[in-house]
Every structure is written in C-alpha cells, then in structure tokens.
Image (cartoon, helix red, strand yellow):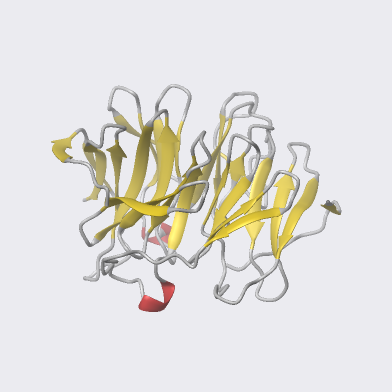
Amino acid sequence: MLRIADGATERGGDAAMGRVTGRLVFTVGVAFLAAAARGHPGAGIIVDAQGDVIFTDTGGGIWKIDNQGQLTRMSKYAYHWIALDKEGAFSDTNHSLYRRLTPRGTKPALLISDDRPIVIGRDGNMYHAACHYSGPLLVTRVEPAGDTFVLAQVPGNDYTTRICPVNGIAVAADGSIYFSEMQTVTKVSKEGAVAGVFGPITVPECAAVPGVSEGLKPYLRGLDVGSDGSAYVAASGCGAVLKISPSGTITTILKTDSPWSPTAVALGGSDLYVLEYLHTTGKNPREWLPRVRKLAADGTVTVLATVSRH
C-alpha cells in the first residue's frame, strides 16, 4: 500500500418497479442559492442509525427527513456529497477533501465534500477514488489522524472513457469498496485487489433526461451495497435505479418519469431511499429541485419529501 506523504496533494479531475403511492409527506420551499449550483446536481444521501434520511440539495443546502417524516434544513452549504462519521473522529472543520458540519466532540459527525465522493467505512477510515486523465485511478484511504494511503491503483480498460471524476463510492460490510464511473461499477477488495468490473452497463428503454448527452449514458452516480453484496446504483442518465447482484446480474428496480432522475441511493434496513432531481431545460436549468422517494421491501414507492424554490 502506497502512503502519501504529509503535505503532499493528490488531485483528481474535476423494472421490476413496485406500485407507486401518491402520498406526499412533506414539501418545503427555499430561496435559490445560485452561487451553489455547479455543473451537476448533488449525489449525497445517507440513512443514520435513527432512521433519519439526510440528503444534499445543490441549490439549497443539506436537509434531514426525520423518522417522523419532518423535513428540516441542517445546513446552508450546498455541496455535492455527504458522509456520516459515526465516531466523530474526523475533526478538521475545513479539510482540503471534506468539510465537517457538526461541532468537534460530537458524534456522529456529518461531513460534506464538493471535490469528489467520500465514504466512511466500518473501520472508521475515509475512502475516496480519484480519476486521472492519464495513469491509473487511485482508490485512497484517509485515516482520522490524517495519514493517507493509496489502497489500489485501478488501470483503465478498453470500453470505459475516463472523463473524470468518479461519480459515487460505497463500502460494503466486508470492507470492499465499490465506485461508479459513467458506464461501470468497479469493486476493490479491502486488500486493494480489483475484484470485479461491472459493465459497460446499458439500461433497456433508457429514458431521455434533459442535459445528459447520449455519450454519457447511463451516467452512473451514487451507489450503496447491501449486506448480501448486491450493489444499488443510480443510472442518472436513464432515469433508473439498478441492482447488481454479486454474480453480476443487472436489473432495473425503479424508474422515474422524466425530467426527474435519480442521482444517489442509500439503504436503510430493507428499504432503499433514492435522491432524485428535476432536470429542467427552461429559464433556469440548474435550479435542480430535489426529492426523496422510498422503495420499500414490498415494492411500494413513496415520495417522502420534495424541495421547491420560491
């Protein structure tokens, strides 16, 4: 394992559908923060130990849906990705890789990132993957004390165009790391070996999503991994959520109606929570209104919250 020396920097490039219920649990309006809107909507959603759902809103900050269905804004900072540090060990309030939102000494700690997706593993370490325009992709482990190690160097292949950056990352129960690029999901073992590359992935009946070109599809983004090793990933360029079995079988488990499209997913028990954004092509195409839907184990789909702008 390659250790990155202190002070060094390492840069990356910028349906088996269930029945849908019409119940809208909560809708809220906020002022649009134009300066926060970047080149794509956020892809951060997590479910904490209490069953609260926390998600990013690129135009409005960080929101929480508590286990009673109440929606509140936690932060005005409109970053792209979030991670939950259960032990509160990552104490830097403004690190080059992440920003800590919760006060020092509290746990869990909420971390946000705008440069690349981050995740905290069960071992308490942070993981991210940095794509480079030349050379291998680096999967990196960051320890709470600040020591940084390259866990794996993933070479390119003949069928994935690495246009950077990596779009999502997750850590499985066994410590293996999964990350998504535009057309592939790659699995790296906790020892640093490439254990599988799923793709190039195509989505049957891929929906047209405003702002996503054909060359980027299916535009895989945020993902999570279940206890059985199944990976769930948002195919943002096709308006779909995919399930990848441990053997590599890929199925569509949820679709959205364009111009809504998923950007990230998170497992909470046996349910799957999906962050979706409204991709518009009108006067303000980067307004990106978010909502959260839940795909329950019985196939029921429920809208938990929708954010609007006034």
The answer to whether residue 152 is left or right of residue 70 is right
**Could you say where residue 178 lies in the image, as x and y percent from the top left?**
58, 50
Q: Residue at x 30, y 59 (%)?
A: 239
Q: Is residue 72 above or below residue 198?
A: above
Residue for point 68% across, 30% down? 89
Image position of 180 (left or right of 19): right
Residue 210 falls in image quadrant: bottom left
Residue 105 at x, y percent in the picture? 65, 24
Asked which quadrant contains residue 64, the reply is: top left
Toward which corner of the image does residue 236 lie, by quadrant? bottom left
User: Which one is nearer the viewer's eye here, 121 or 200?
Assistant: 200
Pick the front one: 257 or 35: 257
- Name the residue rendered at 69%, 32% in the picture: 123
Residue 74 visible in the snapshot: no
Instruction: Give me the residue at 24% from left, 71% from top.
Output: 281
Q: Say whether residue 144 is left or right of residue 295.
A: right
Q: Position of residue 244 (x, y in %)?
A: 45, 50
Q: Would you say residue 18 is visible in this rendering?
A: yes
